[in-house]
Amino acid sequence: AAVVCSSDRPSYPLVSVSAPSQAVFELTQADRRWQGTARYSHAIGLRIYRCRIVAPAPNAVGLRQNVSSPFKNLELLAERAPEASHSVAVEVSRLEPDCLYIAAADAEPGHLAFAMLRVLTSTAPRFRELST
């Protein structure tokens, strides 16, 4: 799965899997040769967060899951510090089926003209997108 984002349109992909899986998240910016420069002038980085889904107890009758704050259990799982390069990648050795994974691109404000995030998993992923 892939998503395109920019400074004008931030995007936060949500990834989940139905069975334990490995994954690679790769963020790529436009090639520097399109701008005719010798190096990348904008740094990009990537953060991966995990949100554990907490369902009500199986014997709880009449109770529903509290969805008022679905990201209450958010934790930073992996991070790649911003660097001036064409792409950055983060490998996650184990995606769990009862979790949501959120990818956040780090870039200098107003300077990311175009970026693409690719998510490669060893099992079929479910992919949703939060955008502003």
Image: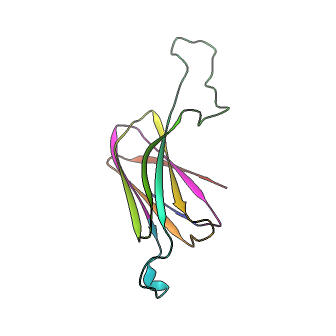
Q: Is residue 50 above or below residue 31?
A: above
Which of the 4 image quarters holds residue 89?
Answer: bottom left
- Counting from the top left corner in percent of width and height, residue 128 is at 54, 49
Which residue: 45% across, 80% down? 32
Which residue: 61% across, 60% down? 10
Task: Indicate yes or no whether the magenta region holds residue 55.
Answer: no
- Counting from the top left corner in percent of width and height, residue 90 is at 38, 54
Highlighted range, magenta: 7-27
Total numbered labels placed on residues in the image: 0
Q: Is residue 103 above or below residue 109?
A: above
- Counting from the top left corner in percent of width and height, residue 112 is at 56, 70
- Counting from the top left corner in percent of width and height, residue 56 is at 55, 20
Q: Quadrant of the C terminus?
A: bottom right
Q: Is residue 117 above or below residue 78?
A: below
State the residue in front, 65 or 81: 81
Task: Indicate yes or no whether the magenta region holds residue 23.
Answer: yes
For the rendered model, the colour scheme is rainbow
